[in-house]
């Protein structure tokens, strides 16, 4: 359980709530063990006064004894009600301190994990699935919260109530107390064993439910493929098989859980039977009173729930330890890309230099660039062409410091990108990735994503430059249209153009378009390029593409092959060489 020591900082942070919680647990249980004493007292007094009443039943004193007995019962009843109310109040305070504390800790943990996600580099996200990343913030943190809240609360409640109840029982009669409590450890052991089985079955059920959910999600997402290949019956059969397995497991779990109440009733029944048998013999011997037997019965009944929760709380603690271990390991990860504290944060001019750069993707081992060198002067417009996998997109990733090169240097304005502050570096470079991503928000908010306090006019101007304004105005809610998850409400070309508008609205000196207009028609493409040519006269522009833009006079055209520059020059120079660029131009233009 050493993993849970990492939570001590939170307990210290919320020590006031934690301390008050322990105090309220103690007070509430004090008022829980007082009623048995009152019940024992009133039963003994009523029992003795009834005997006296029978002796004076036919005399004038009989009414006095009736009044006395009723008064004792009424006073005791009022005390019991008062104690119950006071205990209820302190139980409310107990939950308001400990459970609320666990919610604060949950918030702090989620914030800490989310902040860690923001620090980690792109390589980490390439090698971890979205489901695994989300489970740390949802399932793992929730399991830890069950420890910092309910598990701690019920454990403290068990310790305090058990200690007070056992003390009260041994105070009356040690032998009777020891015999009456003997079945309770067996009950606790049984509950722990059952919970162990339940945990294993629950884990299996969770895995099967995840598989069932994934199967359903894939079927819904890929319904067009399913229908086009006429695989409805096979998909239905797969889902039915998974459902049958899930049903079998849940029924097995229900059968195991069904042992809870019978075992609890069995052991408590044995404990009560021992109490009544031994207690009755001691009453006959005059060692204890009838009220003491009632007192013992109440103590044993009170201990039933705390003892039965031992298995549940131990299970929660074990789960929390496993989850906290995963959280600790994650929080100890160090990002590959670190922003220098005294890094450069000046305005960029736009000069870019790649010098003998080598790069291998860490998650695949693929060598993307090999001894790559390229110089781009401020304001130049550069096209990077090449086949799929030639290393084109890698240039953008390295320039933004999503990764660091294995060898060589990358500089902006003659300063190594490693010496730039990450925030400043990325704020001054606009990047439209190959895989367009839009948030499930309005078009307006998607375009204004990178900028604060942007006017509608500026948003509209950026959309006009990206040649998407007319498309947006044709929608029912225009710029207030919610695009849905990942922009599902828009076409591929519209999503690309909204992404371009988002990049253009951002203040930048360098613009990188990574195959960002591949889904638009030729007319739209030419309109976008014409707008960009007029708007970006002073900015450095890198267009990564597999198509040739014949109406844009690039200062440099770079052709990549296997991570190396195979051709470089202007359009006219490359056409004269009659290499890859020449063949591609003849194929696409003619």
Image (spheres, rainbow, N blue to C red):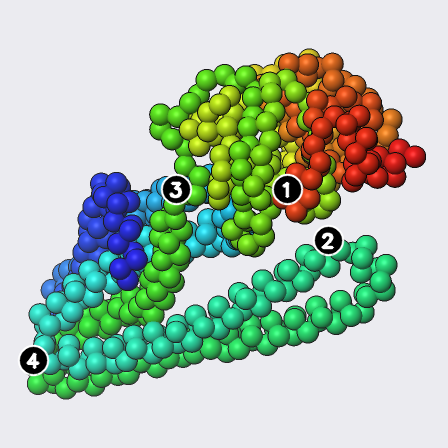
User: Which tag is nearer the camera, tag 4 or tag 1?
Assistant: 1
Pointer 2: residues within 10 angstroms few (<14), some, or many (20+)? few
Vertical side of 297 occupied by 515: above or below? above
Residue 568 seen = yes
| Disc 1 to disc 2, C-alpha distance | 39 Å
Vertical side of 219 occupied by 375: above or below? above
User: Which tag is nearer the camera, tag 4 or tag 2?
Assistant: 2
Which residue bears the numbered disc 3?
112
Vertical side of 520 occupied by 289: above or below? below
| Disc 4 to disc 1, C-alpha distance | 99 Å
What's the mark number on residue 574?
A: none
Tell me the SS state at disc 3: helix
| Disc 1 to disc 3, C-alpha distance | 42 Å
| Disc 2 to disc 3, C-alpha distance | 33 Å
User: Which tag is nearer the camera, tag 1 or tag 3?
Assistant: 1
Which residue bears the numbered disc 1?
564
Q: Quadrant of residue 386?
A: top right
What's the mark number on residue 287?
A: 4
Q: Return the x and y of residue 536 as percentages of the image width and height.
A: 68, 17
């Amino acid at each position: 359980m050493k993993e849970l020591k990492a939570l001590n900082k939170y307990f210290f942070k919320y020590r006031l709530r934690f301390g008050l919680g322990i105090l309220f647990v103690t007070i509430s249980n004090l008022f829980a063990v007082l009623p048995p004493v009152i019940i024992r007292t009133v039963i003994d007094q009523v029992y003795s006064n009834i005997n006296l009443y029978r002796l004076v039943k036919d005399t004038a004193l009989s009414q006095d004894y009736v009044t006395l007995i009723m008064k004792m019962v009424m006073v005791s009843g009022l005390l019991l009600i008062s104690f119950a109310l006071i205990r209820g109040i302190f139980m409310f305070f107990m939950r308001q301190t400990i459970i609320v504390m666990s919610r604060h800790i949950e918030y702090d943990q989620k914030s800490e994990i989310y902040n860690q996600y923001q620090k980690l580099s792109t390589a980490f996200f390439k090698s971890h699935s979205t489901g695994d990343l989300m489970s740390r913030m949802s399932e793992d943190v929730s399991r830890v919260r069950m420890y910092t809240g309910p598990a701690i609360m019920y454990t403290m409640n068990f310790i305090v109530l058990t200690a007070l109840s056992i003390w009260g029982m041994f105070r009356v009669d040690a032998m009777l107390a020891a015999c009456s409590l003997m079945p309770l450890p067996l009950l606790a052991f049984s509950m722990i064993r059952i919970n162990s089985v339940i945990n294993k079955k629950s884990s299996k059920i969770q895995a099967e439910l995840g598989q069932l959910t994934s199967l359903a999600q894939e079927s819904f997402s890929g319904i067009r493929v399913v229908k086009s290949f006429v695989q409805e019956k096979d998909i239905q059969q797969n889902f039915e098989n998974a459902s049958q397995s899930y049903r079998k497991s849940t029924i097995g779990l229900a059968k195991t859980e069904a042992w809870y109440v019978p075992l609890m009733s069995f052991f408590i029944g044995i404990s009560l039977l021992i109490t009544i048998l031994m207690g009755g013999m001691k009453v006959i011997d005059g060692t204890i009173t009838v009220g003491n037997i009632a007192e013992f019965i109440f103590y044993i009944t009170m201990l039933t729930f705390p003892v039965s929760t031992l298995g549940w709380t131990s299970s929660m603690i074990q789960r929390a330890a496993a989850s906290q271990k995963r959280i600790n390991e994650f929080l100890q990860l160090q990002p590959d890309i670190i922003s220098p504290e005294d890094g450069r944060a000046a305005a960029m001019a736009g000069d870019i230099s790649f010098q003998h750069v080598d790069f291998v993707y860490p998650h695949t081992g693929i060598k993307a660039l090999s001894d790559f060198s390229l110089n781009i002067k401020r304001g130049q417009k550069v096209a990077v062409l090449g086949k799929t996998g030639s290393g084109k997109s890698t240039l953008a990733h390295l320039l933004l410091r999503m990764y660091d090169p294995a060898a060589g240097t990358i500089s902006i304005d003659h300063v190594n990108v490693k010496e730039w502050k990450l925030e400043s570096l990325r704020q001054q470079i606009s990047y439209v990735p190959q895989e367009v991503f839009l948030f499930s928000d309005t078009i307006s908010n998607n375009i204004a994503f990178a900028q604060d306090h942007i006017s509608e006019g500026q948003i509209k101007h950026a959309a006009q430059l990206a040649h998407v304004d007319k498309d947006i105005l044709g929608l029912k809610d225009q710029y207030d249209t919610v695009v849905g998850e990942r922009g599902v409400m828009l076409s591929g070309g519209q999503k690309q153009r909204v992404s371009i508008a988002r990049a253009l609205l951002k203040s930048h000196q360098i613009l990188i378009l990574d195959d960002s207009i591949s889904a638009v028609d030729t007319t739209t493409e030419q309109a976008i390029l014409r707008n960009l040519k007029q708007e970006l006269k002073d900015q450095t522009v890198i267009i990564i593409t597999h198509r040739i833009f014949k109406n844009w006079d690039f200062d440099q055209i770079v052709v990549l092959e296997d991570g190396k520059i195979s051709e470089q020059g202007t359009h006219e120079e490359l056409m004269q060489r009659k290499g890859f660029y020449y063949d591609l131009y003849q194929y696409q233009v003619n």
